[in-house]
Image (cartoon, rainbow, N blue to C red):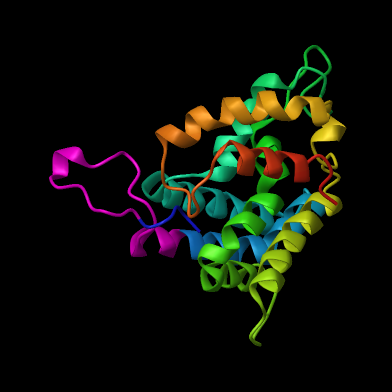
Amino acid sequence: MGGAKRTPRPARPDLRPVYQGANPVSDVWAREALRIVNKYFRRSIFDPEDVEARAEMTFASSFAGMGFGNAGVHLCHGLSYPISSQGKKYFDKDYGNDHALIPHGLSVITTAPADFIFTTPVDPERHLEAANLLGADRSDFPSTDQIANTLADILRGYMMDFGCPNGLEAMGFDSSSIDGLSNAAMGFLKANKISPKDTDLDSVAKIYEQSLKVY
């Protein structure tokens, strides 16, 4: 939910960055968006005539945007831009066949399972809350690995159910693409330092590698 907490605080208001990092206000929007997604996402996709579900997902989209518009975005988005810009072999069925295109949402979700496995150790409780809001219902005391994989599996489930391409390989990338993707992503991540966990070239490359196949 949102970005990581920003420390130290800027000394003066004029030094504040555009993104503030996780905060109680952005968390309100993020939590409500996740609750709606859990209840209505599949309904809205599987039944296009389900007006209630589609309306609720419109709210979820708006609420999520209000949340990350304040808190900021991190790994999923930072790693998505090279995927979209370097993806020259994938033609999305919903966007026509006149030119190659990897839609932004698809480029974001593709690395999300690996991203959250990477960030969970920094704040397991926060990731568990997100998983539970998405329907995990883990009231026990799962390990960090269990939390990470529970959240990742929920995202994989959405991708499978909605027929998303199974990872970067299904969109025309392979292991030889990892270096180019990783180097491009580092530019965004260095300029936007609110990831819950510090990254370097090796960790980013590992996330891309784990995202060659997702489910």
Q: In which quarter of the image is residue 168?
A: top right
State the residue lying farthest toward the left: 12
Q: Can residue 48 be seen in this view?
A: yes
What secondary structure do most residues of the magenta stretch adopt? loop
Q: In the figure, 192 relative to 23: above or below?
A: above
In terms of depth relative to the viewer, which is nearer, 15 or 90?
15
Q: In the figure, 145 relative to 209: above or below?
A: below
Residue 122, magenta (yes or no): no
Image coordinates for residue 118, horizontal then vertical, percent: 62, 55
| Magenta-tinted stretch | 6-29
41 sits to left or right of 129: right
Q: In the figure, 12 relative to 8: above or below?
A: above
At horizontal 62% and vertical 34% (from top left) the residue drawn is 80
Image coordinates for residue 91, horizontal then vertical, percent: 82, 22
Image coordinates for residue 154, horizontal then vertical, percent: 74, 62
In terms of depth relative to the viewer, which is nearer, 80 or 182?
182
At horizontal 42% and vertical 45% (from top left) the residue drawn is 72
At horizontal 23% and vertical 42% (from top left) the residue drawn is 16
At horizontal 77% and vertical 62% (from top left) the residue drawn is 153
State the residue lying farthest toward the top: 98
